[in-house]
Amino acid sequence: MDSLKNYFLERFGEEPKYHIFSPYRVCPLGAHVDHQHGLVMGFAFDKGVDLCFSPTEDGEVELVSRSFEGDIRFNIQAPVQVRNYNWGDYARGAKFALRKRFELKYGIRGVLQGSLPVGGLSSSAAVLVAYVMAMAKANNISLTKMEVIKIASEAEREYIGLNNGILDQSCIVLSDKEGILFLDTDSEQYRIIRRNPKMPPFELAIIFSGLTRSLVSSDYNLRVNECKAAAWNMLAYEDQPLKKLEKTFLRDVPKEIYERTRERMPARFARRAEHFYTEYRRVRKGVTAWESGNLALFGKLSFESCESSIHNYECGSPELIAIYELMRQTEGVYGGRFSGAGFKGACIALIDPSKREAIREKITRGYLEQFPEYEGTFSISFCQVDDGARFVDCE
C-alpha cells in the first residue's frame, strides 16, 4: 500500500501513523438468515478496504477516498449529525455508535481505498469496521472483537438504516485464513472450522455483474419485515404470546409450528420461512461437509442455497441469475451463490484453481453474450481466504 501511504503524504504533508486492512466477506451458506438469528458460514478474503490514518488533537475528522469523490469533514466532539447521504455517512455512523458508549475527544485524518468493485461483498460493513477500529485507536479505547462487531452493526442499523444482523461484521472481524467461520447469530457463539487435510485446493471467484446497488434502497429491508411477519403469523395461528414485531424472529418459532401453519399464512410469508428453515438445515450439513473435507458436497449445498434465494427469498436480478446458471454449467466450480443481498452486485464461487482461466473464459463469454452492455464493467477476480480486520505495518 505504498501508493496509499504516499497519497496520504501528498494530501496531509505527513506520513500516516496507522494502517487498517478490513477485508470483504463472502457467505457460501447461511444467506438471508442472520437478521432472523440463524446459522451462517463465511470467509473474509484478501481484498478489502485499506484505511491509512493519524489521530487529530482537535477532534477534527478529515477523510478522503480514492474510490469516491469529495472530502469528508466533521468534528468528533460535536453532536451527531443527520445523514448527508454520501460516503461520509459511514464515518458519521461509526461516530454515532461509539459515542453511545464512550467519550470521543480525538478525531482522525485518513485516506480510504477499496480494492474491488462495490456490490455484494459487504464493502459498507468493511468500511464501518475500519472506522470503528480507527476512531477507537485514536481515543485509546480498547475493544474486543465482539464489541467491534456490535458497534459496527449498530451503526449500519441505527444510523445508515439497514436492518441487518451481524453476519457481515462477524466474517470481517473474526475470520481466520486457516478455516471457515461458523456462527450462531442467536447465541453469538462461533468457531473456526479448520480445513480438513483431505480437502482439495480451492480459491474464491468473485464475479461482479457490472451493476452496483444500495441495500437501503433495495428490497432488503422489506424482506426482513416479511420474515418477521411470517414468524408473527405462525405464533398468532398457534395462540402463542406475541412480542413487538422488531423483537420477533423466525429462530424463535419451531419448525413444527411452521409445518402446521404454512398453508394458512400468505404464500409470500411461507416462502420466506421456507428459506429460513431449509437454510438452517443446509448450514448444519455444510458444517459436516467442511469437517470431513467434502468440498463437492459443500459446493452443492451452496448451489441449493442460491436456488432457495431465488425461489423462496425471491431475490436476484436477471444478471445475477444468469451468472449463477453459468456457474452451475462450468467445470471446476464446486459451488456458489449470490453474494450479499442478491439484488444486484456479485456472485461468489468456490473453484478449482487449476481450472481458473477456463472458468474465467467460459463465464465471461456466456455472460457478455446475454448482457453485452456490461462489457466495460463485468469482471472476475480470484481471491484467497484471509484473516479478519487488523492493523498492518504502515511502512
Image: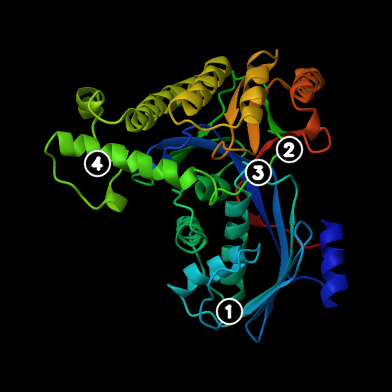
**Residue 189 placed where, x, y %?**
38, 44
From the viewer's side, name the closer residue of 378 and 99: 378
Q: From the image, tell me which residue sits under label 2.
A: 210
> Cβ–Cβ below 8 Å for labels 3 and 1?
no
**Residue 270 placed where, x, y %?**
32, 29
Q: From the image, tell me which residue sits under label 3.
A: 119
User: In the orientation shown, which residue stands out farthest toward the bottom?
Assistant: 58
- Which corner quadrant of the image does residue 361 belong to? top right
Q: From the image, tell me which residue sits under label 4.
A: 232
Left-right relation of 181 to 116: left
**339 to 288, vertically: above or below:** below
Q: CA distance from mark 3 to mark 2?
A: 9 Å
- Circle 2: residue type: Gly
Q: CA distance from mark 2 to mark 1?
A: 36 Å
**326 to 233, vertically: above or below:** above
Circle 2 SS class = loop
First of labels 3, 4 by sequence position: 3
